[in-house]
Image (cartoon, rainbow, N blue to C red):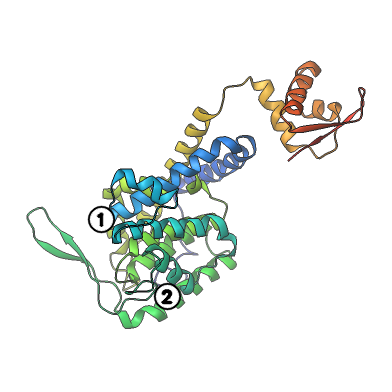
Amino acid sequence: MMSFRGTRLQNTKLSLSIVWLLESLAESKGRQQLYEKQSSQVLKSLREMALIESTESSNRIEGVTVERNRLRPLVIGNTRPRDRSEEEIVGYRMALNWIHTDYRKIPITPETCLRLHALAQGGTTSGDAGQWKNTPNDIIEIFPDGRREVRFRPLAPDLVPKAMEELCLAYRHAIDQLQVTPLMASACFILDFLCIHPFRDGNGRISRLLILLTCYHYGYEVGRYVSLERIVEQTKEDYYETLKTSSSEWHEGKHDVMPWFTYLLSVWRRAYREFEDRAKRQRPQRGAKTEMVEYALDNMISPFGIADVEQLCPNVSRDTIRLVMNRWREQGRLEMLGRGRDAKWRRKG
């Protein structure tokens, strides 16, 4: 849509601070993959915590709340919702589950946006869940003295279907033609989505689901372990302010996407910092040499011998390597093939 029209994105020069943030995020993405190989069991609790926090925060931003003692059973368990707010909590969890499970198969299309809306609105067929808006929905700012002012006027309802088709097509074209870095394309897509405001209600929640989905497509999966929605809620003043700044003159195509892009980069960077900090705190403390051997064992191609492990751990004694391998065998993680010093080993599971 407006952010992708013409050549403005291709001609945009990124500041040194933006380049530094992008490089930092790329490094964090690599470290996340390392943690996933080394600490898969530890990360299970982080995933559960993030699912609860994401569901709670994204709905609370939109004014949807439930009793605290009901939240976990609704999100993690199979508790049936008992009112409309709880239906939306369960619906958002269903939308998150769909993204977490099938993101590789979920394209950026208007149909995807409609399905996410249907799920996040409670998965019901009643009302306008999963349908474009049919009435105007101006974004109103309410001041402390009660005064109201139109902050932004989105597209008219009759323009929405065509605009969403154009937006999704332009986004995919920008990615396919390598016109812009994926994270910037994601930021532009989300900004345009919010400016179109295609649904009567729930646009904020769908935008946050789309942030997750687009990031997952390019390997930035920190949202599995740290709630991006919670970080947005904690920084919602900056969220609304940068959104207001970047949407100014959007209809004329003269808007500046960089404040919004910078904000999203800061959210992703904070999430990765939290992820690494939490993963380190929850992971059992071990000696560096033991950790090196375990990482080598996790990445060996079976069958292999002790000499193969030694090549990957040049500063670790054979006794330490044997100790770790024997412990893994007792835990059922390794199997010894044959006997003697030249015996081969194989990972199990």
State left or right for residue 27 relative to residue 75: right
Tell me: residue 65, above or below residue 139. Answer: above
Residue at the farthest left position: 145
Q: Quadrant of the C terminus?
A: top right
Q: Give me the residue at 40% from left, 80% from top.
A: 161
Q: Give me the residue at 18% from left, 60% from top.
A: 141
State left or right for residue 46 relative to residue 91: right
Q: Position of residue 198 (x, y in %)?
A: 35, 72
Residue type for callout 2: Met
> Does the image show residue 142?
yes
Q: Give me the residue at 29% from left, 58% from top.
A: 85
The residue wearing badge 2 is 164
Label 1 crowd (10 A; few <14 / some 14-19 / many >=20): few
Tell me: residue 286, above or below residue 55. Answer: above
Element type at marker 2?
helix
Q: Give me the residue at 53% from left, 45% from top.
A: 23
Q: Nearer the viewer, mark 1 or mark 2?
A: 1
The residue wearing badge 1 is 63
Which of the 4 quarters of the picture holds residue 59?
bottom left
Element type at marker 1?
loop
**Closer-to-camera residue (78/207):** 78
Q: Alpha-carbon distance for marks 1 and 2?
A: 26 Å
* Among numbered discs 1 and 2, the one appearing first in the sequence: 1
Residue type for callout 1: Gly
The tag on residue 212 is none
State left or right for residue 73 relative to residue 30: left
